[in-house]
Image (cartoon, coloured by chain):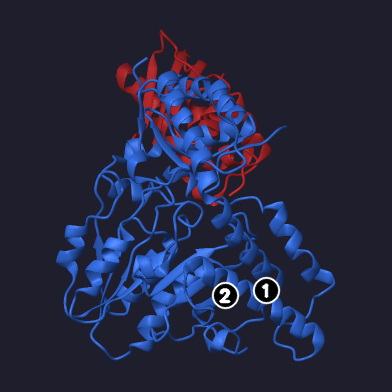
Chain colours: A blue, B red
């Protein structure tokens, strides 16, 4: 069966050009980048070349890049590593209510250790409320971490504006952004954004899984969580994932080169998808504010349904999407992002996220429109509470 | 979290989904805020459940539980129907992922609610 893939926020296929760059580093040029012999040097050279690519992409110096296993690790290193480095000082840290769990869980962990945490609410469109952030800042505040774009509804956060705001406070507040979802669509110049730390992941940008990067502005505090191999200036020990790092370097190059073209194409398809879904399926709410969101995201609630059922029924037709329903998360709570946006739990349960990518076509959209209305009406018919 | 083939079969083509217009017992449990609502319709004749249908809002597990429950209950006496446990439902579905076990409880509760409804009316 042909797969129609609308789940690019979960992961993306590795671009063939990226794969081609990576392949020699598995079996032929397999050296350990920390070895001094020629195979090792060859690997080290590839790692450093990739580091330059990532640094160019972020408009920073290559010694400000640390390679990691992905954004979850980058986020954990930053949050816990700053607190470790600034040990002994009075601490208050801030984040938003709609972050990924790889931010929220380290924050919750630190809260248990006695650190004060403030969660900034979002407006109905999923954008952080700057006024609340201003009010939350106090003299003990040492860290603010706000995602660049939300993974579920795609809302873009005003990172540059927050960066400016924080730079005007008369004590240093370190600023981190989890840019994982934003990299494909938005410029990531760390100087323009005004961030001290930035996380990104390879597999969201047509690169490989298991590799990511962390930008650490020169002179910013950070202590390692993982010790023993002395890689990455002792900040992230562990044998270099050479093929992965090579892939990441090529992936960011391609993102930069094709960004405008891809954004345009994806945005156009998304508009058609939204228009057709709303036209063909009554009682549907669009949760993505397209004026303040990535071009890739279209997040809907189908009233009187449950998202996991819809997701699986679409899967039987070869269409892959995600849901914010509690039933798919393994917990009993629906998506925290949707609840933070003021969406009712019963509406959040019936939500489906389409995240489009560069290889999607109008035929893909047509396939969704061919099957989705029937699926929704089937489940509504099955719902004892839905007015038929 | 992976569903058994049996769960997927029931989810794809649920047995006995719908309404019994002249049902003499109805049970309903769950809450849309939690994302699960299960409604069971029974046609009981002389202590035997002659017909059963369900309507469910919920995930694949909730729908599969409803479907397999109707198979288990049909033509059973009320006494026998009350003996059906959540473990039996899970077993007949070829297992359920751990976070979904509570869905099987929902099935048992909906059935018990329906039978209670019937018995209350007999009083």
- Marks 2 and 1: same chain? yes
Q: Chain of mark 2?
A: A
Residue at 37% over, 75% down: A196
Tell me: residue A222, above or below residue B15: below
What residue would you read off at disc 1?
Answer: A241
The secondary element bearing badge 1 is classed as loop
Tell me: residue A143, above or below residue B106: below
- Mark 2 crowdedness (10 Å alpha carbons): few <14, some 14-19, many ≥20: many
- Mark 1 crowdedness (10 Å alpha carbons): few <14, some 14-19, many ≥20: many
* Disc ID at residue A67: 2
Distance CA(mark 2)–CA(mark 1)? 9 Å
Given residues A189 and A1, the one toward you in this image is: A189
Given residues B65 and A112, the one toward you in this image is: A112
Q: Quadrant of residue A242?
A: bottom right
Residue at 22% over, 67% down: A165
User: Residue A272, image x and y in percent?
Assistant: 47, 28
Q: Is residue A250 left or right of residue A350?
A: right
Q: Is residue B13 left or right of residue A73?
A: right
User: Residue A276, image x and y in percent?
Assistant: 46, 23
Q: Is residue B56 left or right of residue A370?
A: left
Q: Chain of mark 1?
A: A
The C terminus of chain A - image quarter: top left
Residue at 43% over, 44% down: A324
The mark nearer the N terminus, 2 or 1, is: 2
């Amino acid at each position: 069966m042909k797969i129609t893939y609308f789940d690019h926020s979960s992961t993306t296929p590795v671009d063939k050009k990226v794969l081609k760059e990576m392949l020699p580093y598995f079996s032929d040029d397999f050296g350990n980048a920390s070895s001094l012999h020629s195979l090792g040097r060859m690997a080290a050279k590839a790692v450093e070349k990739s580091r330059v690519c990532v640094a160019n992409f972020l408009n920073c110096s290559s010694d400000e890049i640390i390679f990691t296993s992905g954004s979850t690790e980058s986020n954990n290193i930053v949050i816990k590593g700053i607190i470790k480095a600034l040990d002994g000082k009075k601490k208050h840290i801030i984040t938003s209510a709609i972050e990924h769990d790889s931010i929220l869980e380290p924050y919750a962990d630190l809260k248990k250790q006695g650190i004060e945490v403030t969660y900034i609410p979002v407006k109905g469109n999923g954008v952080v409320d700057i006024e609340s952030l201003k009010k939350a800042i106090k003299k003990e505040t040492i860290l603010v971490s706000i995602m660049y774009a939300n993974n579920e509804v795609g809302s873009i956060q005003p990172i540059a504006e927050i960066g400016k705001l924080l730079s005007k406070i008369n004590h240093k507040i370190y600023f981190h952004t989890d840019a994982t979802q934003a990299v494909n669509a938005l410029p990531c110049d760390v100087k323009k954004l005004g961030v001290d730390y930035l996380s990104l992941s390879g597999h969201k940008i047509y690169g490989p899984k298991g590799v990511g990067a962390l930008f650490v502005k020169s002179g910013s505090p950070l202590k390692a969580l993982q010790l023993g191999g002395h890689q990455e200036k002792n900040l992230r020990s562990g044998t270099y994932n050479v093929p992965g790092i090579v892939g990441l370097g090529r992936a960011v190059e391609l993102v930069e080169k094709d960004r405008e073209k891809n954004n345009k194409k994806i945005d156009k398809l998304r508009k058609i998808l939204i228009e057709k879904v709303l036209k063909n399926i009554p009682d549907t709410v669009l949760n993505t504010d397209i004026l303040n969101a990535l071009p890739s995201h279209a997040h809907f609630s189908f009233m009187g349904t449950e998202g996991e059922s819809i997701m699986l029924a679409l899967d039987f037709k070869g269409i892959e999407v995600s849901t914010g329903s509690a039933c798919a998360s393994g917990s009993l709570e629906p998506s925290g992002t949707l609840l933070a946006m003021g969406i009712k739990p019963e509406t959040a349960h019936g939500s489906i996220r389409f995240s489009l990518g560069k290889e999607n076509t109008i035929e893909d959209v047509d396939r969704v429109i061919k099957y989705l209305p029937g699926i929704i009406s089937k489940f509504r018919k099955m719902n004892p509470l839905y007015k038929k | 979290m992976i569903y058994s083939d049996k769960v997927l079969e029931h989810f794809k083509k649920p047995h006995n989904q719908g309404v019994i217009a002249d049902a003499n017992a109805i049970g309903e449990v769950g809450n849309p805020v939690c994302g699960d609502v299960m409604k069971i319709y029974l046609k009981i004749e002389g202590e035997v459940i002659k017909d059963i249908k369900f309507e469910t809002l919920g995930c694949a597990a909730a729908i599969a539980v409803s479907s397999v429950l109707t198979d288990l209950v049909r033509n059973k006496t009320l006494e026998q129907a009350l003996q059906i446990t959540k473990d039996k439902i899970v077993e007949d579905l070829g297992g359920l992922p751990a976070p979904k076990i509570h869905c099987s409880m929902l099935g048992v509760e909906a059935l018990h609610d329906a039978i209670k409804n019937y018995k209350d009316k007999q009083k």
